[in-house]
Amino acid sequence: MIALNDLARQTRIIRDHVDAAVARVCDRGWYVNGPELAAFESEFADYCGGGHGVGCANGTDALELGLLALGIQRGDEVVIAANAGFYSATALRAVGAQPVYVDVDGSSLVLNAPAIAAAVSAATKAVIVTHLYGRMAPMRSVRTLCDERGIALIEDCAQAHGARQEGRRAGHWGDIGCFSFYPTKNLGAIGDGGLVLCRRADVADRLRQLRQYGWQQKYVSVSGPARNSRLDELQAAVLRTKLPLLDAWNERRREIARAYAGVANADIAHPDVRGDDYVAHLYVVRTPFRDSLQRHLQGAGIASEVHYPLLDTQQPVLAAPDSWHLPESEKAVKEILTLPCYPELADREVRHICDTLATWKR
Ligand SMILES: *Cc1c(COP(=O)(O)O)cnc(C)c1O
């Protein structure tokens, strides 16, 4: 069976480096808020093109802390997409802000500036764009729109580490870029992890307070509503060993995506795999006959999954779902299917997946 992800493969390849990183932390005896975190924060920020990195416990916390650091409060409206896994919405719910759902572009499945512009009101304080499946939203026009309207721009980069548009990395366009290092991400820890990237030093200071009880210094709380959300030394050390490999891993992901995209089957629509603003986090095809394709793949020993089976607006936790007009999102959610796409896939596995796609008949 070709799994959707096989995390042990990557660890096996770089095992000596991971072991050395773990040993370094164990021997030092400094396990939280130490030199590995400080080094990773600055190395990751440099990789992204500069600014300040503030580590935290996971990607959802990065979004929540980012919202708080920008001053988003209860009742503020924040524009988001509905097809991005409910992560942004979870963060908005935690701070009490109101999601305003905007439909995504029907082919790229990410937000664009005209759609955002149509939804912005006087109560809109921010936009969260999710670079879904590793495809960046069109940032030049979104950035311009946010500047013109005086609203904050938050990038959810949890699926887009290292992606670049006009030479500028994901996370560097927004006022804030939020990253997850969940193990399956393009840059993954061996556990949970997250980071907020920001350009302003005062915002970074506030983030450092908000992630640790509101402390300005030990035991002196000046910021709220704060919490405890830290990226520990073991995870930071492992991430440091992986960061130099990220570009090559992304290139290998793109190579696999290009192979899939070359398969002609009239019932399968492929994503656009061109450009380095796509880092193939998930390879997501579309077909109106999804169950049939999934069964065919399964029969050939290939796992597949749906990211994501529900729109935010369809989540059971929302007692009385509002009626949003999201035709492209609603169409896509019924057609999307994710294929295995990770750097450690062998060429023969990629070929087997291509052959299986080519021979499928609905
Ligand atoms: C994974 C993911 C998150 C959440 O990250 P966690 O570390 O699991 O909290 C947020 N947004 C997107 C788009 C993601 O893919």
Image (cartoon, helix red, strand yellow):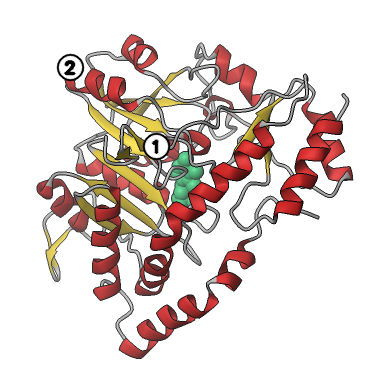
Residue at the spot of label 2:
148
Q: Nearer the viewer, mark 1 or mark 2?
A: 2
Question: Which one is nearer the viewer's eye here, 266 or 301?
Answer: 266
* Label 1 residue SS: helix
Badge 1: how crowded within 10 Å, few (<14), some, or many (20+)?
some
Quadrant in the rendering for residue 219: bottom left
Residue displayed at 46% across by 61% down: 192
* Label 2 residue SS: helix
- Residue 34, numbered circle: none
Q: Which is nearer the N-term, disc 1 or disc 2?
A: 1
Residue 213 horizontal/vertical position (percent): 23, 61
Answer left or right for 116 relative to 16. left
Q: What kind of residue is marked 2? A: Glu
Residue 353 horizontal/vertical position (percent): 77, 43
Quadrant in the rendering for residue 56: bottom left
Say above or below: 70 vs 115: below
Residue displayed at 49% across by 42% down: 279
Residue 34 visible, this angle: no
Q: What kind of residue is marked 1? A: Arg
In the picture, which quadrant includes the N terminus? bottom right
User: How far is mark 1 from mark 2, CA to CA?
Assistant: 27 Å
- Residue 93, numbered circle: 1
Query: In the current view of this chain or complex, which residue is farthest to the bottom?
Result: 27
Residue displayed at 42% across by 35% down: 277
Residue 98 horizontal/vertical position (percent): 35, 27
Residue 284 visible, this angle: yes
Question: Disc 1, disc 2: CB below 8 Å?
Answer: no
Badge 2: how crowded within 10 Å, few (<14), some, or many (20+)?
few
Residue 318 horizontal/vertical position (percent): 53, 30
